[in-house]
């Protein structure tokens, strides 16, 4: 086993995170932390690094995680990764033009590989990946609206590490991450416009973040989350944006 592969989370953390209620609570906490990055104007790069680190923390048995997006030249690239092993495993996929991460992105589905040593779907990739000490993988698309932005993947150093529970967990996490990334891309665009237009874009972004927190906390869809925000705004005699800002900031303070 390669010494480059970092150790996995401790047993108590693994047991906690597979509990649905605890998992949802930790997702709220995680995205509250990332909403804090937006509110304090941190860079997109920092946010992506935080996403991968949180993936390792939250998905049991995971030893490495990465995010694949398109770079400015339109090429697939690992925009953030927890370590060099993940980057090398991803680079092999890009060179081959095939692999579980790329399939998850293209088909917009969660792709699980239970044992890289015996899986026959991508033999030219799985062979070198096992030599890196990776024996299981789980990949999920990053989809925001109608756009597939990329994919997030996690790796384990043992076969059979992931089950349907981890698939569901990574799916919840990836949907929230995609919304965050879409908002942060909009934030970058907002820097190139001025005045009222930029302010309007920022209002949409913080509303998106607040909806994501409510979705993870209450187990509702995006429409229901917005209705909760709107109802709260009417009851308080405020605006949806102000309610969203207060929710994001109070969640950050509560979870720290």
Image: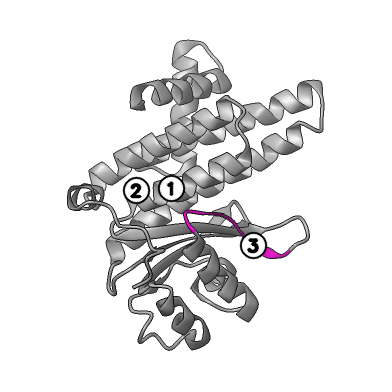
- Where residue 134 appears, x then y in whole percent? 39, 72
In 3D space, how far apart are the residues under numbered discs 1 and 2 (Cα atoms)? 6 Å
Near mark 2 (Cα within 10 A), the count class, few <14, some 14-19 or many ≥20, is many
From the image, tell me which residue sits under label 3: 77
- Which of the two labelled residues, at mark 1 and mark 3, occupies the earlier sequence position? 1
Q: Return the residue at label 2.
A: 57
Describe residue 196's horizontal placement relative to residue 81 as left or right: right
- Residue drawn at point x = 69 percent, y = 39 percent: 186
| Viewer-proximal residue among 18 and 228 | 18
Precedes in sequence: disc 3 or disc 2: 2
Q: Nearer the viewer, residue 30 or 129?
A: 129
Residue 12 placed where, x, y %?
A: 17, 48
> Quadrant where the C terminus lies?
top left
Q: Is residue 226 left or right of residue 60?
A: right
Position in image of residue 89 (x %, y %): 51, 70
Q: Splitting the image into 4 quarters, where does residue 62 fall? A: bottom left
Residue at mark 1: 53
> CB atoms at circles 1 and 3 under 8 Å apart?
no
Q: Residue furthest top?
A: 237
CA separation in Å, label 3 and label 2: 23 Å
Q: What's drawn in magenta, residue-wise?
A: 75-83
| Callout 3 crowding tier (Cα within 10 Å): few <14, some 14–19, many ≥20 | some
């Amino acid at each position: 086993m390669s010494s480059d592969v970092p150790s996995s989370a401790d047993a108590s953390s693994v047991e906690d995170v597979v509990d649905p209620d605890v998992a949802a609570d930790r997702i709220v906490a995680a995205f509250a932390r990332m909403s804090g990055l937006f509110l304090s104007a941190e860079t997109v790069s920092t946010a992506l690094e935080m996403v991968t680190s949180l993936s390792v923390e939250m998905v049991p048995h995971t030893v490495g995680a990465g995010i694949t997006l398109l770079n400015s030249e339109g090429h697939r690239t690992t925009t953030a990764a927890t370590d060099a092993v993940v980057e090398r495993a991803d680079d092999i996929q890009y060179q081959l033009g095939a692999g579980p991460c790329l399939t998850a992105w293209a088909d917009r589905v969660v792709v699980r590989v239970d044992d890289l040593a015996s899986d026959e779907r991508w033999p030219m990739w799985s062979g070198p990946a096992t030599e890196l000490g990776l024996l299981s993988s789980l990949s999920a698309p990053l989809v925001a609206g109608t756009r597939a932005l990329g994919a997030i993947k996690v790796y384990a150093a043992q076969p059979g590490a992931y089950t349907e529970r981890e698939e569901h967990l990574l799916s919840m996490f990836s949907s929230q991450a995609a919304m965050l990334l879409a908002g942060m891309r909009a934030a970058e665009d907002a820097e190139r416009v001025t005045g009222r237009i930029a302010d309007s874009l920022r209002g949409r972004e913080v509303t998106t973040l607040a909806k994501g927190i409510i979705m993870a906390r209450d187990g509702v869809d995006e429409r229901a989350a917005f209705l909760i925000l709107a109802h709260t705004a009417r009851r308080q005699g405020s605006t949806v944006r102000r309610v969203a800002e207060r929710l994001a900031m109070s969640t950050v303070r509560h979870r720290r």
